[in-house]
Amino acid sequence: MPTKWTQGELEASVAAYMEMRRNELNGVEYSKQAYYRDLSNRFDRSAKAFEYRMQNISYVFSIMGRRWINGLPPAKNVGINVARDIENIINRLEKRRDAPVASFEVEVANIRKKKDRLPPRGNEKPSAIDVTTTRFMRSAEVVAWVLDLANGTCECCGKQAPFMRDHGTPFLEVHHLKRLADGGSDTISNAIAICPNCHRELHYGADKDQRRLVMYDLLERLVE
């Protein structure tokens, strides 16, 4: 039985994960076990090994601030290089060029596990890299409409915007409940105006899926 995962195994695993994820997002029934068995038949690994790998992929999705598959909670036992490869495969399959985040976050997590660390020296002159990212063209009219509806109050927590912009308007951020990258629409039925804290929680919070569902009950204009 092989130990080190090949690039082919990783690519097949990520492709299968993303297909399952699309099915889940679109309400299509599917069998996780069928995917694991198919991968096991194609490669010299057990179905259980692929299930564990899927949880690593969930971890990378969580680092990216994106929804992971129900029943496949993120497993953090993934190396820096594998995390980088998984993220690269995700972006390639989605034809996106997002700035990489997974390997850096895994490295930070690994460092934080170490005891008796000395204060780091850091870099007096940090190096720079050129990064090309993919962004969706958003409607300014939708953003303006949603901000006007919110009128300076976070539509998630109900609190006032945390501060005023220097030009005198309340600072709220427009968030798409179903991400544009996941096929969500850029419409007022999929967008909410929220404070930065709620925005981060809806991307990275442990209960982000529950918070997301609450929003559909809270605001009549939203359509799941």
Image: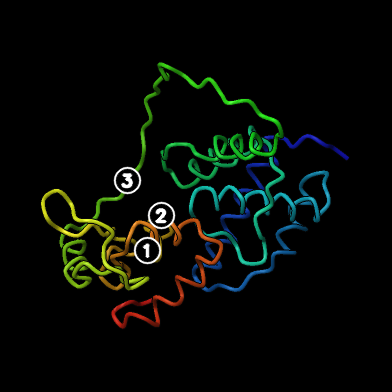
Which of these two is toward me, 37 or 142? 142
Above or below, 118 against 55 in this view is above
Cα distance in 3D space between marks 3 and 1:
14 Å
User: Considering only order in the chain, which callout, 1 or 3, is on the residue closer to the N terminus?
Assistant: 3
**Label 1's element?**
loop
Q: Is residue 112 left or right of residue 223?
A: right
The image's colouring method is: rainbow
Marking on residue 4: none
Name the quadrant containing residue 219: bottom left
Mark 1, other Cα within 10 Å: few <14 / some 14–19 / many ≥20: some
Q: Is residue 136 left or right of residue 46?
A: left
**Label 2's element?**
helix
As drawn, the residue found furthest toward the left would be 167
User: Considering only order in the chain, which callout, 3 or 2, is on the residue closer to the N terminus?
Assistant: 3
Image position, residue 173 (x, y; %)? 28, 58
Residue behind mark 3 = 135
Marking on residue 184: 1
Q: Are marks 3 and 1 in contact (CB under 8 Å)?
A: no
Residue 3 in sight: yes
Q: Amino acid at mark 2?
A: Ala
Marking on residue 181: 2
**Label 3's element?**
loop
Mark 3, other Cα within 10 Å: few <14 / some 14–19 / many ≥20: few
Q: Are marks 2 and 1 in contact (CB under 8 Å)?
A: yes
Image position, residue 15 (x, y; %)? 60, 50
Mark 2, other Cα within 10 Å: few <14 / some 14–19 / many ≥20: few
As drawn, the residue found furthest toward the top would be 125
- Which quadrant of the rendered structure holds the N terminus? top right
Cα distance in 3D space between marks 2 and 1:
7 Å
Residue 54 in sight: no
Cα distance in 3D space between marks 2 and 3:
9 Å
Which residue is found at the position 63% from the left and 49% from the top?
57
